[in-house]
Amino acid sequence: SQELEQSPQSLIVQEGKNLTINCTSSKTLYGLYWYKQKYGEGLIFLMMLQKGGEEKSHEKITAKLDEKKQQSSLHITASQPSHAGIYLCGAISSGSARQLTFGSGTQLTVLP
Amino acid sequence: GAVVSQHPSRVICKSGTSVKIECRSLDFQATTMFWYRQFPKQSLMLMATSNEGSKATYEQGVEKDKFLINHASLTLSTLTVTSAHPEDSSFYICSARRSGGDYNSPLHFGNGTRLTVT
């Protein structure tokens, strides 16, 4: 089964600082997804990466997938309190139903 | 577009009773829906895959008789927690994949249901 390790588990940064969250897979990724969640609420889709070396950006968030397609990073530039939440990386399984399974999550706190 | 509605958002029930949670795709058809469970400060754990017109597929360790899933139409899947106990208290969230969509297309998530069993 697909296993995703996220690091760090939690992160506290001062507003304005940059930060990076990592997601490592035990298997080659066919699609890597980043979602954001505030606990007790639904998930917000951020980005999806499919190709080795791919990089996508949206506002101040950039996500990359390495060439071997086993590791992804999510980088936030000049963090703001609105960036706070749980960041989850997810991968589609190779099973017939193509389930989406998630990493352990990273709890981000941004101090004003 | 691509809205998934989950109802109720919060429910409190007494131990021993059953609770039904609905997941609806409002503006698209979904052959496949997924049910997740989330404990405080933890990630989402996939419970089962709900397939329209057929039996659900449960992940290892998930009791199919306890968590009944019905996917009777292309826009509705229900999760029934039977004979609920306090340890079933959790946040349950569903997601849906558009019928005919690329397997790699993002899943659309409901806003979740917080279940508290007293």
Image (cartoon, helix red, strand yellow):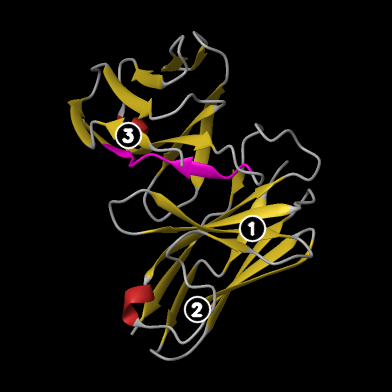
Which corner quadrant of the image does residue A50 belong to? top right
Residue A88: x percent and y percent? 40, 37
Taking the image as shown, residue A1 lies to the left or right of residue A112, namely right
Residue A97: x percent and y percent? 65, 47
For the magenta stretch, what is the residue range?
A98-107
Name the residue at 42% across, 72% down: B115
Residue B44 is one of the magenta-drawn residues: no
Q: Amino acid at mark 3?
A: Glu
Residue A38: x percent and y percent? 39, 46
Q: Is residue A19 above or below residue B50?
A: above
Q: Which residue is mark 3?
A: A5
- Quadrant the N terminus of chain B occupies: top right
Q: Amino acid at mark 2?
A: Lys
| 2 and 3 marks in contact (CB < 8 Å) | no
Name the residue at 78% across, 49% down: B27
Q: CA distance from mark 3 to mark 1?
A: 30 Å
Q: Which residue is mark 1?
A: B5
| 3 and 1 marks in contact (CB < 8 Å) | no
Chain letter of mark 3 equals: A
Q: Mark 1 falls on what kind of element?
A: strand
Marks 3 and 1 on same chain: no
Residue A106 is one of the magenta-drawn residues: yes
On residue B33, which mark appears? none
Q: Is residue B57 above or below residue B65?
A: above
Q: Mark 3 falls on what kind of element?
A: strand
Which corner quadrant of the image does residue A25 belong to? top left
Chain letter of mark 2 equals: B
Q: Which residue is mark 2?
A: B66
> Which is closer to the viewer, label 3 or label 1?
3
Q: CA distance from mark 1 to mark 2?
A: 23 Å
